[in-house]
Image (tube, rainbow, N blue to C red):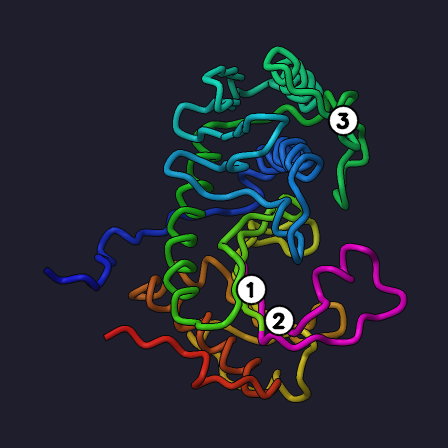
Amino acid sequence: MQLNQTPDTSEFELPPLPLEEWEATKDTLHLYLQIIGKIRLTLMPPKNHWWHVTLYLTSRGLTTGPVPYRFYTFEIEFDFIDHQLLIRTSTGATEQIKLQDGLSVAEFYTAVMKSLDVLGIQVEILAKPYDNKSKIPFAEDHTHATYHPEQVHNYWRILSMVDEVMEEFSGRFYGKACPVQLYWHHIDLTMTRFSGKKVPVRSEASRVEREAYSHEVISFGFWPGDEQVRFPAFYSYTFPSPPGIENEPLQPAAASWVDSNGSPMALLPYEDLRQEENPRQALLDFLESAYQAGAKGAGWPVEELRVTHD
C-alpha cells in the first residue's frame, strides 16, 4: 500500500477574488465571524498565543469546534454550501439560522443569541466589532446586510485549497506549530512556526501582542484584502525580524518584500499565484522560501527541525 501519494494538482484551480466585487459581502461576513469568534473567546479555556479564539475549516465551511459549556459541549458551524449557521450540542439539540442577502448584522446577532438561549446556553460578549472599520455595535448594525451566497462559497473554496497546502507545509516541521486556523480579527487563515525561544516583550505592547509575540515566530497567512491592501495576498513575517531578511530570495518571482509597520514582510499577491503554471507548488515554494529567509537570519536549527518523509 502506498502511504504518501502525491496530491493531484489538476483540480487545484484558484478562482478569481477581486476585492471590489465582493467587499460588501466580505464586510458583512467578517462581522458575522467576529460575533461567533467572540462567543468562542468567552467560553473556551485560554490557550497559548490565542489559539482558543480561532475558527477552523470544515468540509462545508468554518467551525468553532467543540466549545465546553457546563456538562456538555456545543459547536457553531458556518455552512457555506447550504448557507446556514448551525448550532449543535452534544445532547443532540440543534438550531439553524439561514444565511441570506438582507440579513443584517443586527438580525444575525439577535438570531444567534436567541438560538443559544433556546439551547440553554447563556453567554455575554463585548458586542461590538474588534479592530474593524465598522464601529457600530452588533445589535444596532443594520448597515451591513449584504450576503451573496456565490461570493461566500467562492471565498470558502479558496480557503479550503489554501488550508490543504498549509497543512502539508506544517507537516514538514518538527518544532512547535499552531493549527491551520482562521483569526476572525482580520479574517486571515494562518499557520505559525516557533523556534521555542522566548523574546523580550515590549513594555508598551498590548495584551494581545504580549501573548502573541512572547516567543520567536515565523508566521504565514492568507487574507482577502482590506481598506489598506486592496487585493488578496499571501504573506509571511518573522518576529523578531532579523537584520537583512529583506535581501533573502523569495519564490516564485512574483513574491517580494514589503514594509509592514516598519518590518519586512514577504508578500505574494493572490492573482499572481493564479497565473502560475502550478499554483499549488508555487504556494509551497513561497512558504518555504519565506521560512528559510526568516530561519536563516534568526539562527534557527533548520536541519534539526526539518521533517523528511520517506
Crowding near the residue tagged with mark 3, few <14, some 14–19, many ≥20 C-alpha atoms within 10 Å: few
Residue sitting at x 39%, y 71%: 172
Residue 302 in percent (x, y) is at 48, 84
Residue indicated by mark 2:
217
Q: Are marks 2 and 1 in contact (CB under 8 Å)?
A: yes
Quarter of the N terminus within the rendering: bottom left
Residue type marked 1: Thr
**SS at mark 1 in the image:** strand
Residue sitting at x 35%, y 62%: 279
Whether residue 69 is visible: yes
Q: Quick one: label 2 or label 3, which is nearer the N terminus?
A: 3
Residue 192 is tagged as 1
Residue type marked 2: Val
Crowding near the residue tagged with mark 1, few <14, some 14–19, many ≥20 C-alpha atoms within 10 Å: some
Residue 235 in percent (x, y) is at 56, 65
Residue type marked 3: Glu
Residue indicated by mark 3:
124
Residue sitting at x 80%, y 28%: 137
**Which numbered mark, 3 or 1, is in the foreground of this view?**
3
- Kindly indicate the quadrant of the structure image that contains residue 135: top right
Residue 56 in percent (x, y) is at 50, 44
Q: How many marks?
A: 3
- Kindly indicate the quadrant of the structure image that contains residue 272: bottom left
Give the magenta part as a residue range. 195-221
